[in-house]
Amino acid sequence: MDAEGAVPDRRWDGRDACAALGLGIGFLILYLRTLCPTVYLGDAGEICTAIATGGIIHPPGYPLFSLLGRAALVLIPYGEPAFRIGCVVALAAAAAVAALCGLAREIGASRWAAAAAAAAFGASHTFWAQSTRVEVYSLHTLLACLLLWAALCYRRSGSLAHLTAAGLVGSLGLAHHLTMVLLGPGLLLLCGRRFFTGPGRGRRFLVLGVVLSVGPALYLLLMHWARAEPLQDWGRPVTLALLWDHASARFYHGSLHLPNGPRILQRLAGAGALFVDDFPAMAFLMPFLGAWTLWRRDRVVVAGLLLAALGVILFNLCYQIDDITAYYLAAWIVAAALTAVALDALWARARRPGSQAVLAIAVCSWLFVLPLARNWRGCDLSSAIWVREFTRQKLECTDPGGVLISAGDDDTFPLWYVHDLLKVRPDVTQVDRRMASGMWSRRDADPSLWYLYRLRCQGVNAPVTVPREFARRAYLGSDGYLIDLLNGPLRGRPLCATFFNSHDPMEKDARVFFRWAAARYQILPLGLVLRLQPIRRPVDLKALIAENERQWTRITQPDLRGVRTDGELASDYILNHYTCSLINFGGLYELAGDRARAGALYRRAAAWAPGYKPAAAALASLQRQPTAG
């Protein structure tokens, strides 16, 4: 071991490569073992549908991930499209753990400490959870880790090869996730004055300019794919102007703004809680110890790493979205690398062989075994087919030849996957209320009108003409476009919806649709959906109850105990949807005078989701009613 305070030997050798490779293979086995076999929450359904149909993912389009996903669909013969694309996610995650080992070695950590810190990061909840379902963040973490590693190598060696590697990785990072630019200030500090003033500056800039163009050039693939008019064509980047809008993620610019005082305190508290959760059992103190230890040896390296992490954290505080947790991973890799330095500092104080053996066992248990056991149940998605089954059940509850109206990402994205890729209920036409309105919700209509073209690919004669009058566009953006579709091209078809709760804060913008539907339809529960039955048609309550009984015999409520969805956009969406549907079913029995059966369903709903207040309210209301006779 190096004496405390000595400059460590950072030369990468065959033993380091073997250690990193072994670590990567071990975590690849872990991630594949816990990989979700099908669609999951979040963007998984949308990403899979886009890749499998040759289309475009949401902004910025992720051309690099799309290429890898398409290759996986061709090369991996087993499993659903989501599983095969998920193998790319698992492989990138395992490679990120191995690369983190190299990054920690480059800042001076010993081999064992680098491996221990990388293993702790690999078993942390946020990273593990993002590595076992179709998402883009494991690849982003890998590229961020490689970029920092290459920049540190260039700082040490001044080699053009290391600078070229950093430029290429950064360029590919831009072809994947635009937040890669947040590492820029820290990278410039790590590269130091040598980058700007050293000999061969012209050659460096020329080579760097060439490799930096590789990633942005991949965005031209989006235009090529879009011109084939695929089903999933988010942003429809068929022109350079539309391509720029999509690649620059203009769609999400409105979510980026400085938070006010209470909001920033809330975001800081959330970031702190996440940090403690990913570095549990006081392990969150280790990065601070590592930063202090490394500061005494190389202040520029510590400043560069912390500046890179700070850029990520500040952006996350300003980016006002709910599912922000995965955005912190690029900062957490810095914390993990500094943890490795802290482990060496502790090791240097355990000078006796017996003390070192005890410390090694304690570190292994503390940083790896404990998080592995703690996070296994929440991150093991190998049996998590409940999102697919929940979505399939909604489609199967829809009337034959009907139109299923959905609302929101967690509602719609799995529907795209199950309906468009797995071909469940092809007779049903699925329409998302928010997207149909969102094309017109800003002062100017979305120039791509991509969702309307998606409806046309589904066989709906959706108009794509932009009206000149602002009042008309405002009407279309307030559910008017959806209403026009239902009154026009979709007229006469049975209508079902996955939502109809005017008290839901997420649906406050649906008042126009609620008023329109309430004036024309009776809203009747039908399994996991709601049937919009014309008012002129009488309701046969007995037949409706029998129909719901048949539906519920085919509906299996999943066991969600131990499942963590706190990092999702709508963490309780599925739980609450099942519960609300049970309450609606109980309401039918209450109308029929069967209080016992209604009470049984309300109690079942309350037991299923104890935190869902309408379930307890329905049961309390039933108990307050006087008993007949």
Image (cartoon, helix red, strand yellow):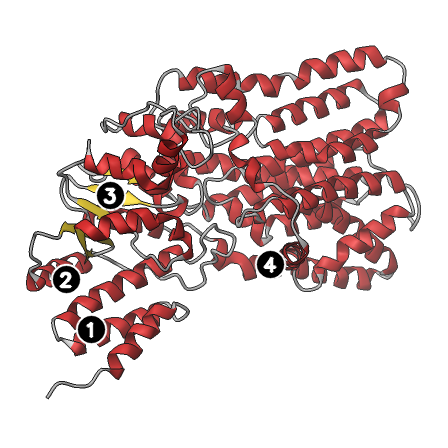
Residue type beneath disc 4: Pro
Where 33 falls versus 220 (above or below)? below
Per the rendering, the mark at residue 404 is 3
Mark with earlier residue (4, 1): 4
Mark with earlier residue (2, 1): 2
Which of the two marks, 4 or 3, is nearer to us in this view? Answer: 3
Give the left or right position of residue 516, taking residue 202 as reference: left
Which image quarter: residue 253? top right
Instruction: Kindly report the distance in space between the C-alpha atoms of the residues bearing marks 2 and 1.
Output: 13 Å
Instruction: For the residues labelled 2 and 1, say whether their Cβ atoms are less than 8 Å apart.
Output: no
- Residue, x 55% and y 38% (percent of image)? 254
Which image quarter: residue 75? top left
Per the rendering, the mark at residue 426 is none
Give the left or right position of residue 486, taking residue 135 as reference: left
Residue type beneath disc 1: Ala
- Residue, x 66% and y 45% (percent of image)? 258
Which of the two marks, 4 or 2, is nearer to us in this view? Answer: 2
Mark with earlier residue (3, 1): 3
Which of the two marks, 2 or 1, is nearer to us in this view? Answer: 1
Instruction: For the residues labelled 4 and 2, say whether their Cβ atoms are less than 8 Å apart.
Output: no
Residue holding disc 4: 371
> In this figure, what is the number of numbered marks?
4
Residue holding disc 1: 598
Instruction: Kindly report the distance in space between the C-alpha atoms of the residues bearing marks 4 and 3.
Output: 42 Å
